[in-house]
Each structure stands twice: as C-alpha cells, then as structure tokens.
Image: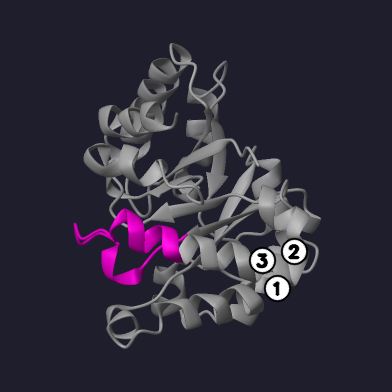
C-alpha cells in the first residue's frame, strides 16, 4: 500500500532565535521549489516554536515539538502541555526518543500516556523505539522493539495520527548507520507487531521512519526499502542543504 514519505527534522537542544529563524526560512524556501513525494516537518526546541512557525509561513513545512507532559495544565514546573503545543501551532510531537528514555528515565508506559494526551489535544505523534548496541549484539533487536511497540503505542493510534520512528540507539549521533537490510528487517517486524496490535489495515498504512544517522549519502538507499517510510533526522537537519537533499531522496 502506498504511504507518503515523512521527512522530519529533530533539532534537539540546538539553535538560538536568529539561527532557528534562518534555518527555518532556508528550509521553507528550498522546499517550495520541490515537488517531493514527502511531507516535511521540523521539530525545534520549545524556545523556537513561535519563531519557526512564523518563518515557515506560506510553506508546506509542518511544525512539531520534541516532547510534552501528560497533563493539560497545572503545577508542573519546566514542562509543557500538548494543548500548549497545539496552541503554538504544532502539528506533531516526538515522544519516547531514546534520549528521553535514557536521560529522563521515561518508561514505555509514560510514553503511551503522553501519546494519549497528545492525541486528545489534536496533535499527531511520532513514537520512537530502538535497541542499544548491547541488545543488538545479543540478537534482541526485534524483541526489544516489539516490547516497546506493544507498551508505547495507544490503542487509539491510527495511521493518520501516529508515526513510528525506529532509531537504533547505537546509531544516533554516532555516524554509524544500520544497513538498509538490517533497518528493513526491524521495520517489517514492527509493521507485523502493529498489525497484531491495531489491525492489518492500520499497520499497512502507518508510516515507520528510520532514524540514526540518516544523511544525504545513505538516504536514497534506506528510503528505497519497502517498509521505510521516511526519516527522523538529527544532525543533518541542522544544515538546510543536507536536510533538503534528504527530502529530495524521497521518491
């Protein structure tokens, strides 16, 4: 079944106002001239959401955030709610990134609860999964990602409101990349697990992105695989030329 690619840039904790504005404008301008078979999304830090939203005005590039709290409001110092993100103009929110799971000890149950709150607020969610290097060496990549899918994805998820991002932890920001064959093996297994959880119809239409050092040099080969429906881009999303080059690879 045909699924439209999604190329999403995760800026992580990078960018001051002038830098974020310039990068967003460059991406907006460059993608206007393209007619890619892909949707394009950028996810800057919270401090840049309003700035980037203005810079993207008139383009088709969507705006996303990198995390959210489970509650709409309240005494949660330092957090931001899904409703606030929606109010700021966000279309998506990334949840369960390995850096959140490790740095903030986020469990799959918490990720699921956040996803439920985000969906209720009208946001679309990108739920991240992925194994560590030790887990891959032990032959547990499929087992680990299956457990994360079963525990992190809400029953209310559909192909239109949820995206899965497979990011092998050992490949994030390291320059190492899973081979297209290894990535496809996990993506195909994830789709099988999604079919068991949500039904074959939903699973066949739900997009599964690859993250973990996708860059211009390897994007086309990865995106050519049957079950890889786009990329969640880290470092390469901070350079407009590299990011747009990956968008061009989505054919």
* Residue 134 position in % (x across, y down): 28, 85
**Residue 249 in sight in this render:** yes
Element assignment for label 3: helix
Tell me if label 2 and label 1 are in contact, CB under 8 Å.
yes
Query: Which dot marks residue 117?
Result: 2
Query: Which dot marks residue 113?
Result: 1
Location of the N terminus by quadrant is top right
- Is 153 magenta? The answer is no
Element assignment for label 1: helix
* Residue 96 position in % (x across, y down): 53, 68
Instruction: Please name the residue shown 47% across and 49% down the image.
Output: 228
Q: Is residue 52 left or right of residue 207?
A: left
Question: Magenta residues?
Answer: 166-185
Instruction: Please name the residue shown 27% across and 83% down the image.
Output: 137
Q: Is residue 7 left or right of residue 58?
A: left
What's the distance in space between the residues labelled 2 and 1, CA to CA?
A: 6 Å
Instruction: Please name the residue shown 34% across and 70% down the image.
Output: 169
Q: Nearer the viewer, mark 2 or mark 3?
A: 3
Residue with the mark numbered 3 = 194
Tell me if label 2 and label 3 are in contact, CB under 8 Å.
no
Other-residue count near label 1 (Cα within 10 Å), few / some / many at <14 / 14–19 / ≥20: some
Q: Is residue 30 left or right of residue 112?
A: left
Query: Which dot marks residue 11?
Result: none
Q: Earlier in the sequence, mark 2 or mark 3?
A: 2
Other-residue count near label 3 (Cα within 10 Å), few / some / many at <14 / 14–19 / ≥20: many
Q: Earlier in the sequence, mark 1 or mark 3?
A: 1
């Amino acid at each position: 079944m045909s699924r439209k690619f999604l190329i999403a840039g995760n800026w992580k904790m990078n960018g001051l106002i002038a830098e974020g504005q310039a990068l967003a404008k460059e991406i907006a301008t460059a993608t206007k001239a393209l007619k890619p078979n892909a949707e394009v999304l950028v996810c800057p830090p919270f401090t840049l959401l309003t700035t980037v939203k203005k810079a993207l005005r008139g383009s088709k590039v969507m705006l996303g955030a990198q995390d959210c709290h489970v509650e709409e409001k309240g005494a949660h110092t330092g957090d931001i709610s899904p409703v606030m993100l929606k109010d700021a103009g966000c279309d998506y929110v990334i949840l369960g990134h390995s850096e959140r799971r490790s740095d903030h000890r986020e469990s799959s149950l918490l990720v699921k609860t956040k996803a439920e709150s985000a969906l209720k607020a009208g946001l679309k969610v990108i739920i991240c999964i992925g194994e560590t290097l030790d887990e891959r060496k032990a032959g547990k990549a499929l087992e680990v990602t299956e457990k994360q899918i079963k525990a992190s994805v809400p029953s209310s998820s559909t192909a239109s409101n949820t995206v899965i991002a497979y990011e092998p932890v050992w490949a994030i920001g390291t320059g190492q990349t899973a081979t297209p064959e290894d990535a496809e093996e996990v993506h195909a297994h994830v789709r099988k697990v999604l079919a068991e959880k949500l039904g074959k119809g939903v699973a066949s239409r739900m997009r599964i992105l690859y993250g973990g050092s996708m860059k211009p040099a390897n994007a086309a080969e990865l995106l050519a695989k049957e079950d890889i429906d786009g990329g969640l881009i880290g470092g390469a999303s901070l350079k407009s030329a590299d990011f747009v080059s990956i968008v061009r690879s989505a054919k």
